[in-house]
Image (spheres, grey):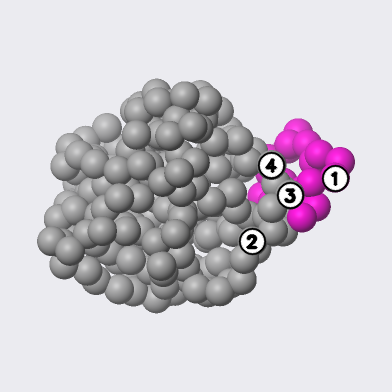
Amino acid sequence: MRRVKLFVLVCAALVIVAACAWRIYDVNARAIRYPTERYGIGDNVALEGGFFADATENTAGYSLRIDGAQTMSYNDYVRAYGVEGAQTVEGLDEASIICLTVTITNDSDKTPDQGGFNISLMSLVKPDGSGLMRVDTKLWSQAEPALAESPYAASTGVLPHTSYTTHIPLSAGLLTRDTLADQASGGVTATYHQPVEPGSYDLYLSVMPTRKLVTIDV
């Protein structure tokens, strides 16, 4: 049984998220200035103030643990994790997403409005930096209805000295430097028909001042 309710704050508009995604891609592909720490499934990763785009994310005291990763279809996800009333969609049965089981822990005294993690900017990146998979907040909202209020970006926090486990889908549509500019104004629309490419991915939990990566194999 979940111990606390996920706290969600609206933090950005669509075009800002697209710009942030491009920035993350550039950092992922080119970064040589920031030290890198690598972790595996089941490791507790202390964020230690690490962030994606802005230090005001205030992640000190927060840690994340990736408990598992699996490929799923849209309908698989809705059946497994959707809240009562969530609907499957005919034909969306291709294994087109990677679902991460993630435990968020707040070991600090900070309340959710005082700190958190911009989890919607978390990304899975191919080792060669050729593209990235974004958190699919639209599908995720089938399991976490509060996200429906913020379809493009959200910062999450949990109550002091508690943990929360959620299931985060990342869409299989890869963004590249060439395609992201065209999609920035209209957002990224997952078709849920592009199959996940098997292999190894790097999950970026932060990019500055330390790149914290979790190796994911699917």
Q: Quarter of the image holding residue 17? A: top left
Residue 84 magenta-drawn? yes
Residue 57 lies in the magenta stretch: no
From the image, tell me which residue sits under label 3.
193
Residue at label 4? 191
Closer to the chain start, of discs 2 and 4, is 4
Dots 1, 3 in contact, CB < 8 A: no
Give the residue displayed 41% in from the left and 69% down from the top: 127
Considering depth in this image, is 98 or 15 the residue closer to the camera?
Answer: 15
The N terminus: image quadrant: bottom right
Query: Considering depth in this image, is 183 or 114 the residue closer to the camera?
Result: 183
Question: Residue at point 50% right, 73% down?
Answer: 200
Question: Label 1, on which residue?
Answer: 91
Residue 206 in the image: state x and y as whole percent: 28, 55
Q: Quadrant of residue 32?
A: bottom left
42 relative to 30, above or below: below
- Which badge, 1 or 3, is on the more N-terminal residue? 1
Which secondary structure class fits the magenta region best?
Answer: loop
Residue receiving disc 2:
196
Quadrant placement of the C terminus: bottom right
